[in-house]
């Protein structure tokens, strides 16, 4: 792209992509080969202002059609079940499975505009179900398989699906973790269960196993949609107790695929592995960024923490490996992958939480010093806003550029430009959400924000520092949202859970970056209520209730007792004061 436009400087190229968005995105759509039934009348309509701008007006298409552009015999998915051998599925075989599922949904009278839910691991069936529903004009609400029944219930209440897909159990590290039962406790509608073992247990009336759901009809014609029709609903915890329900449209995957194309260098028949889940944005991102770029999705069915995963990366000849920094920390501690040959890897990518440079340098060495594409965005952006490239110097734990085709500014608390401050996006950018199912979108993202070059800025909540060389360093969140193990959660959700304990009168949860950088640590402050609980037992009790009621992946590292929580004159908890106290 730079050569085509005679750019010799990457910063000049990025600046062009951000200021000449119509030209950049028009060419990007063509480079990605996005298939339109009817092409857009123009690339961007700003007539209602940048906040309400429309991408690809007049277009008619289904984004799933753009996921099948490779040769029929090309490998679309390579996967390994627990204690199994590596298996490969061609593009034609995947497309046939997708069509069979779409017809099976129609047989249950589920069609255009209806909603289904998914609470599964990232498997071949999960990929095919997800694509099939979107191909059939059905909305997919995705739920992470680690969530508790109460968290599942909240998401089902918001989206009201007619059907949910799940598994009988999750197989993790030799354990069988019930999933179907957990989904039932969350108030599941009619359920289709994908068996992960050879056993068959009795089901609730109306529920069915996969083999009784799937039909043999291999032909299905895509439902043609508008660019802003919803394809999926993902959830991102904000500053209130209920997660934000964020719709993705047929336009959103174009942003994902663009980032995969330019920043992650996904080329035809590359093998992309990213341990993730459809309940997080990187699940849909993995599907669209890989398949639209004619790559191969690599799926490992067990936890990615042991040598077995590393051996899968080696045998599948993965070319792009994505990680959450916490995984790398585990590998570094166990040294489980140091004897393997990862030379097929062309680059790594890291997202979900702040990186520790020492751990990222270790990761690079595992792949014979291949670069790491640091990547930060959000569910409501469809991809990244700050990232790295394969054409710039790579510094572990540091972002080298703003994402192509978009722009952001850093502002201080007074709304003035700064080198260390809060991130505000400059709309329009494809992939930016334009509505929420359960919240006022304008109030969440735009209310009270300043303007930049005549455009109302969009609040994002992250805090960055621009370094002397123009690169960026992540400094965590500015709001009451925290990032734990790559999962966003609102402070109020942690606090509401902790406050139910007998010894807690009130609490405040904060995330603190370790001194050397890296994933945030959860610290909980509390004001004591009279209780018989011994102080040395209280941290364990806090973690037990968080694990049970929120997510088993969350863990507080410190529990600190205070006489009173610091508050403003308006009675708001002063979290910045608490962060400073924890860091001291």
Image (cartoon, grey):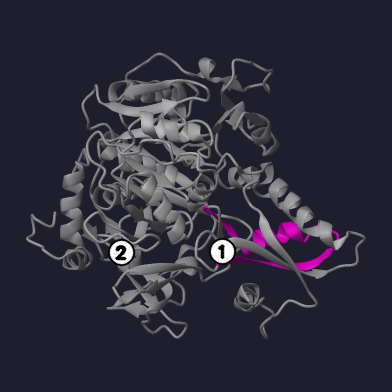
The stretch drawn in magenta includes residue 511: yes
Residue identified by numbered label 2: 400
Q: Residue at x 15, y 59 (%)?
A: 23
Quarter of the figure with residue 419: bottom left
Q: How many residues crowd mark 1 within 10 Å: few (<14), some (14–19), many (20+)?
A: many
Label 2, label 1: how far apart the Cα atoms are: 25 Å
Q: Secondary structure at mark 2?
A: loop
Span colored in magenta: 486-514
Is residue 433 visible from the viewing direction of this image?
no
Choose top left, top right, bottom left or bottom right for residue 498: bottom right
Horizontal side, residue 155 vs residue 446: left or right? right
Tell me which residue sits at (44%, 30%) in the image: 129
Is residue 95 visible to the viewer in this orientation of the structure? yes
**Residue at left offset 46%, top offset 40%:** 275
* Residue drawn at (83%, 56%) of the image: 537
The outermost residue toward the front is 339
Residue receiving disc 1: 481
- Name the spot of residue 466 as percent of width and height, x first: 36, 74
Q: Based on the displayed image, in which of its 4 quarters is residue 401 positioned?
A: bottom left
């Amino acid at each position: 792209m730079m050569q085509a436009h005679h750019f010799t400087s990457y910063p000049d190229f990025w600046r062009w992509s951000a200021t000449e968005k119509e030209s950049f995105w028009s060419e990007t759509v063509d480079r990605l080969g996005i298939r339109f039934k009817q092409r857009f009348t123009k690339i961007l309509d700003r007539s209602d202002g940048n906040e309400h701008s429309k991408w690809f007006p007049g277009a008619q298409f289904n984004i799933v059609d753009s996921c099948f552009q490779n040769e029929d015999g090309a490998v679309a998915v390579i996967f390994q079940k627990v204690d199994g051998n590596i298996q490969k599925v061609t593009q034609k075989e995947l497309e046939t499975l997708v069509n069979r599922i779409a017809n099976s949904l129609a047989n249950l009278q589920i069609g255009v505009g209806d909603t289904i839910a998914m609470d599964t691991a990232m498997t071949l069936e999960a990929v095919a179900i997800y694509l099939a529903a979107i191909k059939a004009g059905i909305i997919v609400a995705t739920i992470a398989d680690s969530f508790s029944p109460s968290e599942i219930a909240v998401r089902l209440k918001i989206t009201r699906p007619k059907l949910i897909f799940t598994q009988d159990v999750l197989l993790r590290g030799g354990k069988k973790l019930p999933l179907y039962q957990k989904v039932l406790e969350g108030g599941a509608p009619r359920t289709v269960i994908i068996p992960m073992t050879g056993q068959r247990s009795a089901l609730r009336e109306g529920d069915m196993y996969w083999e009784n759901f799937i039909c043999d009809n291999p032909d299905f014609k895509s439902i043609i949609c508008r660019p802003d029709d919803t394809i999926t609903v993902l959830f991102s915890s904000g500053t209130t107790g209920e997660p934000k329900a964020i719709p993705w449209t047929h336009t959103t995957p174009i942003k994902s695929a663009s980032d995969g194309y330019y920043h992650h260098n996904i080329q035809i028949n590359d093998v992309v592995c990213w341990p993730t889940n459809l309940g997080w944005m990187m699940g849909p991102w993995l599907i669209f960024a890989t398949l639209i770029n004619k790559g191969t999705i690599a799926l490992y069915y067990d936890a990615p923490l042991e040598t077995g995963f590393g051996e899968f990366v080696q045998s599948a000849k993965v070319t792009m490996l994505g990680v959450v920094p916490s995984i790398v920390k585990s590998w570094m501690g166990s040294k489980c992958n140091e004897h393997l040959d990862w030379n097929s890897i062309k680059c790594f990518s890291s997202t979900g939480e702040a990186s520790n440079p020492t751990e990222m340098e270790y990761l690079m060495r595992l792949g014979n010093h291949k670069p790491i594409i640091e990547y930060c965005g959000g569910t409501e952006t469809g991809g990244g806003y700050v990232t790295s490239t394969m054409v710039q110097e790579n510094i572990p734990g540091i972002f080298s550029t703003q994402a192509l085709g978009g722009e952001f500014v850093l502002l201080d608390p007074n709304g003035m430009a700064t080198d260390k401050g809060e991130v505000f996006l400059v709309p329009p950018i494809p992939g930016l959400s334009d509505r929420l199912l359960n919240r006022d979108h304008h109030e969440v993202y735009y209310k009270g924000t300043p303007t930049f070059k005549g455009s109302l800025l969009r609040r994002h909540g992250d805090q960055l520092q621009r370094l002397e060389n123009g690169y960026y360093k992540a400094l965590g969140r500015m709001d009451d949202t925290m990032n734990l193990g790559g999962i966003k959660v609102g402070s109020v959700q942690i606090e509401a859970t902790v406050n139910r304990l007998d010894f807690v009168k009130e609490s405040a949860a904060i995330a603190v970056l370790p001194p050397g950088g890296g994933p945030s640590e959860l610290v909980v402050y509390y004001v004591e209520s009279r209780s018989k609980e011994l102080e040395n037992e209280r941290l364990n009790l806090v973690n037990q209730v968080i694990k049970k009621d929120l997510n088993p992946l969350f863990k507080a590292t410190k529990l600190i007792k205070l006489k009173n929580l610091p508050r403003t004159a308006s009675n708001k908890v002063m979290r910045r004061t608490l962060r400073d106290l924890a860091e001291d």
